Image: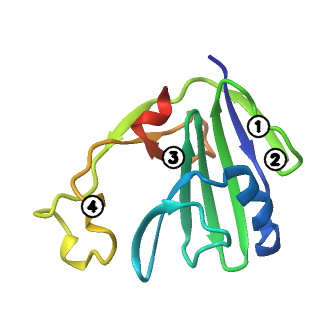
Amino acid sequence: MIWHLHGTGRRTAGDWPRLHSVAVGWDAGWADVNGFHLERLPDRPPVATHLWAWTTQRWLRVRIDGTNWWAALLTSGEAAVGDLWTEHDKVPKPPSTRLRHWHPDEGQVHQFKGDKEILNREDFIQLTPLRPTTAAFVGHASTLR
């Protein structure tokens, strides 16, 4: 299977509807002052620094800095199409590791303000393409089908 890594370059909040149209209906996760969110991709940039979204064989990572954002999309199988993606590379299959969110008895859970259902789950993964400039993508284990 061929894996593809796509990038948007720097975008502004006004470009978010284009990203939203690519990933509408995808599950997404991000943290803000109201806690951790695990819901559909929002229709505008959240007040957060990072957002991850996923669906079957597609994982999105967004870095948000004020009104600017940069997105990277990792796909398995078909490459993404459209002029939103200004960069594209074929990459080897990235390693996948399981993630487990904090157990109620660990770390700083007492400060957790978000959905408590996310705690102690072991059905999320992290994919890390082996490139010097790539960060990890996060998604649900079922997306690797």
Verify CB contact (< 8 Å) between mark 2 and mark 4: no
> Which amino acid lies under the numbered mark 2 shown in the image of this protein?
Trp
Q: Earlier in the sequence, mark 3 or mark 2?
A: 2
Q: Which residue is mark 4?
A: 117
Residue depicted at x 61% and y 37%: 131
Q: In what quadrant of the picture does the N terminus appear?
A: top right
The colour scheme used to paint the residues is rainbow
Q: Position of residue 105 (x, y in %)?
A: 10, 63
Q: CA distance from mark 4 to mark 3?
A: 23 Å
Callout 4 secondary element: helix
- Amino acid type for the residue under numbered disc 1: Ala
Front in this rendered view, residue 20 or 60: 20
Q: Is residue 117 left or right of residue 89?
A: left
Residue for badge 3 = 136
Q: Position of residue 134 (x, y in %)?
A: 60, 45
- Between disc 1 and disc 3, the foreground one is 1
Q: Where does label 2 land, which residue?
A: 85
Q: For mark 1, give the secondary structure.
A: loop
In the picture, measured across the screen, residue 108 lies left or right of residue 88, that is left
Q: Quadrant of residue 111?
A: bottom left
Residue drawn at x 65%, y 72% as measured from the top left:
45
Separation of disc 1 and disc 3 at Cα?
A: 19 Å
Q: Which residue is mark 1?
A: 80
Lower sequence index among marks 1 and 4: 1
Please, which residue is most extreme toward the right here? 83
Q: Give the CA separation, mark 3 to mark 2.
A: 18 Å
| Label 2 to label 4: alpha-carbon separation | 34 Å
- Left or right side of 20 for 84: right
Task: Tell me the tag on residue 112.
Answer: none
